[in-house]
Image (cartoon, grey):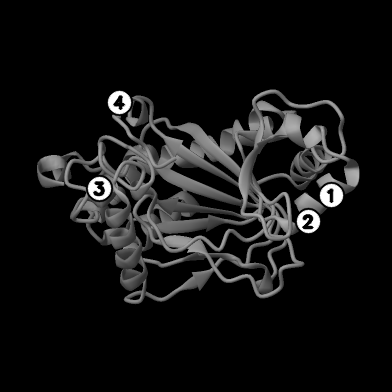
Amino acid sequence: MGDQTRLLPWFDNADALTVLDKRRRRDNLSDTDYQRLHEWVTDGYFVVPGMVNHQLIDSMMHDLDGLWTTDTPHDDLHIYDLRLGPNVPGARVSHSDVCAMEPSVRAAARDRSNWRIHAFEEHSGSARLIFDNPELARVAALIFDRPANPRYAINFMYGSTQTEHQDAAVFHIFPPNYIAGAWIACEDIAPDSGPLMYYPRSHREPLFEAFTNYPQTNLRTVPPDVMQRYNEYAVNLARQYQRHLFLAKKGDVLFWHGMLLHGGSEVKNPKLTRRSFVIHYIPPGMDAGDQVVGPFNW
């Protein structure tokens, strides 16, 4: 990253805990907020129990389930990794095409697929209320010591089984590391459902060496051989840290640093759901995605 290191957020600097103590006095931080930020600096994450209202979650889940039974399509909504046959790979399918299927065909595709939906807040009032939740935004602003906007929301129904990765390798952020993820449990998470896995303190590792001109270069823009090298790098790096599983209760939220290694653990019981809603927070003007030049891998 070269001289980009001087642009890193306060929590990535060597004197971060000293800065935090000054913020405690300056902003009159509560003991709870101080402890959260201390964990953020040292471990790269923290958990807020019971942060999101259960009734709001239930309403969002009702809207999500209704996508499979309605005959009224949602424009511009797509379902990802939907398998239209037992031996067919997952694909991106428009909700219009789903609505055109026979109900039994829809249900079969839904139940056999490890599907997800992006930007559901554009189609569900309840998802929008969670997306715009002021307490979530307050905590995100607390992390950065400046306002941050919710971006790039994803609804998951099942465990993602996604290999270890860092969000900095997926999103184009400048200055670097001004991104935080918020993983919201939409049900009590069972150990065999493929819980979110994360590796405390791994956020201190440097950016992958092949991303030489980040934010232009990351997994979204590199050739396949570099992508493979990154995947091997991340898996090997994770072995140096202790793996934790987020066995959350409904409404719990885990906030994580953009460089923290995380992913989806193995699904031991494919009949179990792992309902979750993920939101990313980025301060205004620091999402450089629209300035990046393709070709793109997705």
Quadrant placement of the C terminus: top left
Q: Which residue is mark 3?
A: 19
Q: Whole-percent x and y of residue 34?
A: 41, 52
Answer left or right for 145 relative to 125: left
Cα distance between the residues tagged 2 and 1: 6 Å
Q: Residue 111: which disc?
A: 2
Q: Which residue is mark 1?
A: 107
Q: Are marks 2 and 1 in contact (CB under 8 Å)?
A: yes
Q: Whole-percent x and y of residue 207?
A: 24, 54
Q: Nearer the viewer, mark 4 or mark 2?
A: 2
Q: Are marks 3 and 1 in contact (CB under 8 Å)?
A: no
For badge 4, the amino acid type reads Gln
Q: Residue 291: which disc?
A: 4
Answer left or right for 147 relative to 132: left
Q: Nearer the viewer, mark 3 or mark 4?
A: 4
Secondary element under disc 3, as helix, strand or loop, is helix
Name which of mark 2 and mark 3 comes first in the sequence: 3
Q: Whole-percent x and y of residue 238?
A: 36, 71
For badge 3, the amino acid type reads Val
Q: Is residue 270 above or below residue 214?
A: below
